[in-house]
Image (cartoon, rainbow, N blue to C red):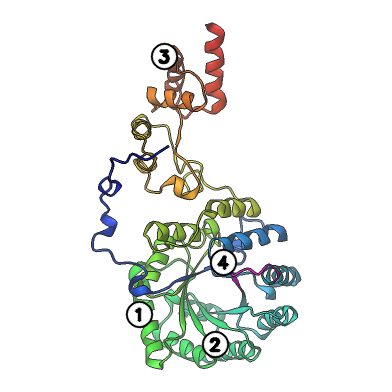
Amino acid sequence: MVNSPLIDESELIYDWNSVEKVSPLSAGRQVSFLCETLRDGIQSPSVVDPDIGDKLRLVELADALGIQYIDIGLPGAGQRAVEDCTTIAKFIRDNGLSIKPGCAARTHRNDVGAIIEISQALGMEIEVLAFIGSSPIRQYAESWDLDRMLRLSSEAIDLAVSNGLPVTFVTEDTTRSRPDVLDRMFRNAVEHGATRLCLCDTVGHATPDGIHNLIRFTRHLLEAMGRTDVGIDWHGHNDRGLGVVNTIFAIEFGANRVHGTALGLGERVGNAALDQVLLNLKLLGELPDQDLSKLLLWCKVAARACHVDIPPQYPLAGSDAFRTATGVHAAAIIKAEKKGHQWLADRIYSGVPAGMFGREQEIEIGHYSGESNVVYWLAQRGIEPKPELVTAILASAKRGHRVLSEDEVRQVIKEFKSAE
């Protein structure tokens, strides 16, 4: 369908998002993304650990989406984890993918040693994401003292660095940790060679104000050390339902790499949904050159591989994301299409343009529908919308309390034709 040349599209939507806009990537800053689907994502108790073929496909799709880093697993967890991490890293190497692999590790020599062995066997660099709990509640539960935590951290970082591997120092539960403890742990990590500090909202505690305060604290600490070259990562969970918006705020406040998973998979209610983060940054105009045409496919492959259902109302990938049976909504979409303006039809009742991400608007027939729904539904399928047929289908819908299925509508059509 050809867009009407008489319409100035910029005049059809007043964008309050752009009024005194604070760009998440102001001053030309760059942000990178780390996919945690194959590590934190599959720690969800409700998912199936994908087979290796599916894992490789997810890595391939993440690379196609321009995601720069991926956590391929925790080899310290056992032999299967070692084998899968080795196979994935080799796949990345042999296929010349741009995405860079990393592995999670406790601040323990055995965990770091397992990553070193994979790296040396394949002759490739693998980032070490070394984690240790830092909050008072974790310290109390584990009976840890700060000196022991500093010793474990420095030993793990030293081991990785001495073997030529980059280290991200991950403080679990950072968002509930004391500043004096973080100060000593961060300084210790950087002094021993960590090139990134990962701020973790491990239990989904943070609000945007907390993120602002924490990133400002970390940035000032690094500036005082003269180490502005050390990166700041944000790793958020979704327990308060703030996973995605917190991640966008973290970028705005200064994080230069953010983590997330496909569909927000992860422990409890999950991690920040990286697909939604990418979608929103794209719509904000922050990723003009990043090709997200395979974003929907990535979500679907993740769902199938992990044996999880995508909720119908899930943004972009859900079955209801661009589907309506409400008469006034459907009528507006139909009127827009009749004007020969697909751009308008794709936005009149949608904040996410379906066509931008490989979807299309869908009009169904239900108890809130009007005649226009039925006429459109029939026309889309090449069926003549006779007034009597339209009336019969709409009457059937009004007698119910939900949207009619394809088979149910076709049954009404069949009965109507039999009675003619």
Chain-order first, disc 1 or disc 3: 1
Q: Residue at x 48, y 87 (%)?
A: 185
Secondary element at image label 1? helix
Cα distance in 3D space between marks 4 and 1: 25 Å
At 45% from the left edge and 66% from the top edge, which residue is drawn?
204
Residue that badge 3 annotates: 387
Mark 4, Cα crowd under 10 Å, few <14 / some 14-19 / many 20+, is many
The span picked out in magenta is 94-101
Going from N to C along the chain, the mark reached first, 4 or 1, is: 4
* Mark pair 3, 4: CA separation: 54 Å
The secondary structure type at the circle numbered 4 is: loop
- Disc nearer the start of the sequence (1/2): 2
- For residue 229, what is the image quadrant? bottom left
Task: Assign a secondary structure to mark 3.
Answer: helix
Q: How many marks?
A: 4
Residue that label 1 marks: 216
Q: Marks 1 and 3, Cα distance to the nearest angstrom?
A: 65 Å
